[in-house]
Each structure stands twice: as structure tokens, then as C-alpha cells.
């Protein structure tokens, strides 16, 4: 790092530690015509500083005086993060531009920030692909906003437009800590109506299996009767006329039973894909464990998707109704 950059780097660190957010630091740098560190554009135009450039500089370990090798590795074609203790950290000749204490505070704030502002890295939100509007059935979308009272925040909104040009009347909502707390409660305390529905389903499933067992017994009996009929005819105990009549009746019955069984087994396969109450509780336990350690939006999204199929959103006035559909 050349001498002119040193005071700039320190200014960035100090501003961030004093509570200025990434966006305002980027604006300040651009306004003061400070060249970006990655200003290699073919047209030579400087596009100015972005939040990500500021973040990258702040998070860099080079300015701690270290260089870390092997932060990522590829395993079976997939790139993964290497655990901290397996990385190779070398004290380099780089000048130290921040203390380890400063670095820690910076990283903590960046991590917190990333939870509130998931788009700063990837287009992923904890509820991506999961939130649906009750009024029109469309997927809800997420938008970042900023105001004095709440600072930077995310809102869920329905942008659906009907064929006649009218817009869905669903009202959006800021997804603050209260929103996520309410959602978490909704998820881990399964609605009694849903439980009853699942139990009913489970008992229907058991009924179907009982019917299948009965029909299977009946089918066996009919097949044995058909064998006996053949034997009787071979042993000349019944006439051909009687044999043919009885065989026709038995064959019809066997065919009918086989068709019924085929349909019943199909029903059982469909119903078997439905979770049981026990399975749901088991998955909720797993969800609570994973959620408590999920930090990034991606981790939260993955954790939610293991348990939840969709979340239906409906807002009337200030009352927000969230309905959770489990996998
Ligand atoms: Zn809608």
C-alpha cells in the first residue's frame, strides 16, 4: 500500500467503527474523488465506490498484517469454506493498518449488517421462494428501504397485477425483528387445525392399509378357489358346464379385487408422502437447532426450506396473519 492510501484506509476503518454505514462511506469516498482500489475499467471511467468495495477493504485480513492461504477448497467439484484452524496464516511484511480488536468489531458489524441486508452479497433472503400472498396467490417480493426511524430495512410486498390492470391489494410489511419473532413462533407452535388435519390424514392412511390387508386375504381365497375348481374338473368331479360357469365368476371377482388393490395402493403411496405428526415435531426440533446457529440469509433460507413448504402472508389493517405449510 502506498503512502497516500494509508490515511484513506484508516479513515474508512474509523468511520465504520464510529457507526457510519457502508453506503455513506462509499458516498463520502466518491464525493471526495478518492480512486477505488479496483479501478481498472477499459473505458477508464471511475464508477465510484460501492458498498461491496468498502466492505471488501474493511474485511481484508491483509491489513492486519497477515495473509491467509487456503480459505476455500474444492471438494468433489464443490467449493467449500475451509475451517479457520485448517487455514494457513502467515505473518507477512504488509504494514498493519488495523488492530485485531478493530478487525473483530468490524467483522461483527459486517455480519450483523449482512443479516439485515442480504442483497449486499447474493440475491438471497431468509424467506426467498417461501412467502406467498393470501389475496392473489403470487409470490411476495422483498425490497430494501431506508428511513430515519428504522434505518435500512427490508419489506415484503406483493407486486401482482391482475389481467385487467388492477393491482393486488395486499399491504406490505417491514420485516423487522418482531416479524421474524412472530414467524418463528408460528413455525414452532404448529396450528392445532393443521395438527388435526394431519392426524385425520394419518388415520385415513391406516384405514386404507387395513382395507388393503382385507382385500389381499380375499384375493388369496379366490385364487385358491380357482385352483380347487381346476382340480375338481381334472378329477372329473364337476361337468365342463359347471366348471366354465364357476371359472367365469371367480375370474371376474379376482380381476375386480386386483383393480381395487391397485387403486388402494396408489392412494397409500400418495398419503404416505404426507408427514405424520411425529415427523413434524421431529423436524421442528431439528429446525430449532439449525435456526439457532444460522447466521447468514442463505443458512436461514436453507433451514426454513427443510421444514416449510410455503408461508402464506395476509395483512388486514395492522393485523398480520402468517400460515405455515409444512413439508
Ligand atoms: Zn397479492
Image (tube, grey):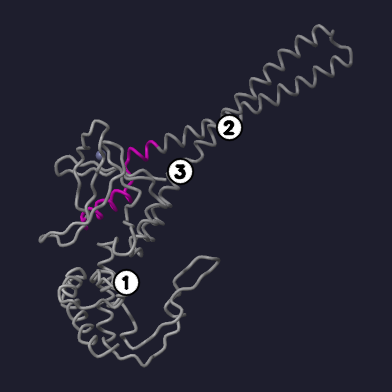
Looking at the image, which is closer to me, 235 or 11?
Answer: 11
Mark pair 1, 3: CA separation: 55 Å
Which of label 1 and label 3 is nearer to you? 1
Whether 180 is among the magenta residues is: yes
**Quadrant including the N terminus:** bottom left
Looking at the image, which is closer to me, 120 or 216?
Answer: 120
Residue placed at 36% from the left, 58% from the top?
A: 288
Mark pair 3, 2: CA separation: 18 Å
Residue placed at 29% from the left, 90% from the top?
A: 96
Residue sitting farthest toward the left = 148
Q: Badge 3: few (under 14), some or many (20 or more) residues near its Cα, within 10 Å?
A: some
Q: Position of residue 212 (x, y in %)?
A: 59, 29
In what quadrant does ligand 1 lie?
Answer: top left
Q: Which residues are magenta?
A: 176-197
Disc 1 residue: CB within 8 Å of ligand 1: no
Note whether 130 is above or below 83 in the view shown: above
Is 208 on the left or on the right of 183, as rendered? right
Q: Main secondary structure of the magenta part?
A: helix
Q: Position of residue 213 (x, y in %)?
A: 61, 31
Q: Badge 1: few (under 14), some or many (20 or more) residues near its Cα, within 10 Å?
A: few
To which residue does mark 2 refer? 265
**Quadrant including the C terminus:** top left
Which of disc 3 and disc 1 is earlier in sequence? 1
Residue 275 tag number: 3
Which of disc 2 and disc 1 is earlier in sequence? 1
Which of label 1 and label 2 is nearer to you? 1
Residue placed at 26% from the left, 52% from the top?
A: 142
Residue 41 tag number: 1
Q: Badge 2: few (under 14), some or many (20 or more) residues near its Cα, within 10 Å?
A: some
Amino acid at each position: 500500500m502506498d503512502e497516500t492510501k494509508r490515511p484513506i484506509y484508516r479513515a474508512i476503518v474509523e468511520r465504520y467503527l464510529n457507526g457510519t454505514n457502508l453506503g455513506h462511506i462509499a458516498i463520502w469516498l466518491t464525493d471526495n474523488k478518492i480512486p477505488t482500489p479496483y479501478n481498472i475499467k477499459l473505458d477508464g471511467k471511475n464508477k465510484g465506490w460501492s458498498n461491496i468495495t468498502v466492505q471488501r477493504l474493511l474485511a481484508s485480513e491483509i491489513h492486519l498484517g497477515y495473509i491467509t492461504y487456503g480459505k476455500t477448497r474444492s471438494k468433489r467439484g464443490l467449493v467449500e469454506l475451509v475451517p479457520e484452524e485448517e487455514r494457513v496464516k502467515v505473518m507477512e511484511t504488509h504494514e498493519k493498518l488495523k488492530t485485531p480488536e478493530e478487525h473483530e468489531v468490524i467483522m461483527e458489524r459486517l455480519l450483523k449488517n449482512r443479516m439485515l441486508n442480504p442483497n449486499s452479497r447474493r440475491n438471497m433472503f431468509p424467506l426467498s421462494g417461501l412467502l406467498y400472498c393470501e389475496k392473489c396467490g403470487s409470490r411476495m417480493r422483498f425490497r430494501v428501504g431506508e428511513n430515519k426511524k428504522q434505518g435500512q430495512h427490508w419489506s415484503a410486498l406483493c407486486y401482482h397485477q391482475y389481467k385487467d390492470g388492477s393491482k393486488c391489494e395486499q399491504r406490505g410489511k417491514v420485516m423487522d425483528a418482531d416479524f421474524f419473532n412472530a414467524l418463528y413462533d408460528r413455525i414452532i407452535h404448529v396450528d392445532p387445525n393443521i395438527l388435526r388435519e394431519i392426524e385425520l390424514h394419518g388415520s385415513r392412511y391406516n384405514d386404507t392399509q387395513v382395507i388393503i390387508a382385507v382385500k389381499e386375504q380375499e384375493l388369496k381365497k379366490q385364487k385358491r378357489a380357482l385352483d380347487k375348481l381346476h382340480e375338481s374338473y381334472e378329477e372329473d368331479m364337476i361337468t365342463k358346464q359347471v366348471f366354465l360357469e364357476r371359472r367365469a365368476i371367480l375370474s371376474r371377482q379376482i380381476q375386480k379385487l386386483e383393480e381395487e388393490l391397485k387403486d388402494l395402493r396408489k392412494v397409500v403411496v400418495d398419503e404416505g408422502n404426507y408427514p405424520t405428526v411425529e415427523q413434524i415435531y421431529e423436524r421442528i426440533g431439528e429446525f430449532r437447532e439449525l435456526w439457532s446457529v444460522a447466521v447468514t440469509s442463505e443458512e436461514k433460507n436453507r433451514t426454513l426450506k427443510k421444514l416449510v413448504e410455503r408461508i402464506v402472508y395476509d395483512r388486514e389493517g395492522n393485523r398480520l396473519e402468517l400460515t405455515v405449510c409444512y413439508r
